[in-house]
Amino acid sequence: MSSVVTYINSGNIIFTVNGQSKTTISHILEEAIHTNFGLQIKVLVRSFDDLKKVIDSLPESWTNDQQMRSDVLFLWDEIDYESVLNKNVSMKLY
């Protein structure tokens, strides 16, 4: 892992990695958080291409200004499907 930076105290970390799957990276980070801080926290890893796909699909009318606040939520692969928007359920991921 290289070029590691955090993003505005949000819990988001941006970094470069070569040759490891998102699942492998998630496990490495979850173990590091547990070892160093004693916390069992699930980590969600998204690639640049994942982010670009979302950014490119956002409506141009979505803005962040005094009238509108637009945010994006990323889901774990296990529940990331279009019909999840129609569900009213509570899911525990861990």
Image (cartoon, rainbow, N blue to C red):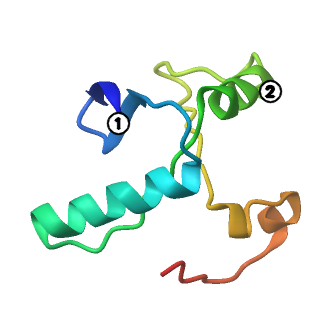
Image coordinates for residue 75, horizontal then vertical, percent: 62, 57
Q: Is residue 61 left or right of residue 82?
A: left
Sequence-first tag of 2 and 1: 1
Which labelled disc corresponds to residue 36? none
Q: Secondary structure at mark 2?
A: helix
Q: Residues within 10 Å of mark 1 (few under 14, many from 20)?
A: few
Vertical relation: 4 (above or below) 30: above
Name the residue type under label 1: Ile
Which residue occupies 46% across, 50% down?
A: 25
Q: Secondary structure at mark 1?
A: strand
Q: Residue 74 versus residue 2: which sits nearer the camera?
A: 2
Vertical relation: 83 (above or below) 12: below
Q: Residue furthest front?
A: 19
The answer to which quarter of the image holds residue 31 is bottom left
User: Label 2 vs label 1: CA separation?
Assistant: 22 Å
Image coordinates for residue 85, horizontal then vertical, percent: 79, 62
Q: Residue 15 versus residue 63: which sits nearer the camera?
A: 15
Name the residue type under label 2: Ser
Q: Is residue 5 left or right of residue 74?
A: left
Mark 2 lies on residue:
57
Image coordinates for residue 59, horizontal then vertical, percent: 78, 24
Which labelled disc corresponds to residue 13? 1
The answer to which quarter of the image holds residue 26 is bottom left
Vertical relation: 48 (above or below) 37: above
Q: Nearer the viewer, mark 2 or mark 1?
A: 1
The answer to which quarter of the image holds residue 70 is top right
Q: Residue 81 versus residue 48: which sits nearer the camera?
A: 48
Mark count: 2
Q: Is residue 49 left or right of residue 94?
A: right
